Amino acid sequence: MKKVLSMLLMVSTMSVSLYAYDQADRIKDMQAMEKAMAEIQKGLLYNNKSMVIEGVTNLKQASVNVEVAPNGAMDFSARFAKRQAQNIMKYSEKIESNIKDGHKHGAIKSYTKVLNECISCHNKIRKWN
């Protein structure tokens, strides 16, 4: 029984250590998200539908990868960041559907919601208060 448990522990440890999402990866993804947000904003301001859609696609790709490692047993930062990323995905889809339907104001409203998700995550995780 001890051998089985130690083998399971070893396999699970090895699978986690194969790819560890580190700070360099997070910085790269955050920069990609910032660039995508700027692209969406520019597309909205210039009324360029394809630029908005391309920015949304880039934002979705970058936000899928974002992870935060918990600092302890009672640290809920990872769960909070995951929920924020899910909300960003949801609002990004609304930006895309609104812009495709010609509802520019709805797309701008959803863009603002994405920006609010980013800011609230940075307030909590990076302690911007």
Image (tube, grey):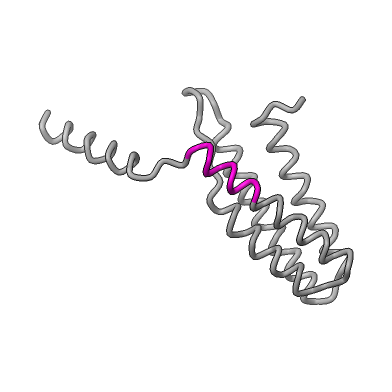
Judged from this view, the residue extending furthest toward the bottom is: 101
Residue closer to the observer: 88 or 22: 22
Q: Which residues are magenta?
A: 22-31
Task: Residue 29: say if magenta.
Answer: yes
Relative to 75, residue 101 above or below = below
Residue closer to the observer: 38 or 9: 38
User: What residue is drawn where x is 56% and y is 46%?
Assistant: 66
Total labels: the figure holds: 0
User: What residue is drawn where x is 71% and y is 63%?
Assistant: 55
Q: Quadrant of residue 119?
A: top right
Q: Quadrant of residue 79?
A: top right
**Residue 26 drawn at (x, y percent):** 56, 42
Task: Residue 97: say if magenta.
Answer: no
**In the figure, is residue 90 to the left or right of 107?**
left
Q: Quadrant of the N terminus?
A: top left
User: What residue is drawn where x is 65% and y is 48%?
Assistant: 31
Residue closer to the observer: 70 or 35: 35
Q: Quadrant of the C terminus?
A: top right
Q: Main secondary structure of the magenta part?
A: helix
**Residue 12 drawn at (x, y percent):** 28, 39
**In the figure, is residue 129 to the left or right of 16?**
right
**Residue 20 drawn at (x, y percent):** 41, 41
Relative to 57, residue 88 above or below = above
**Residue 54 drawn at (x, y percent):** 69, 68
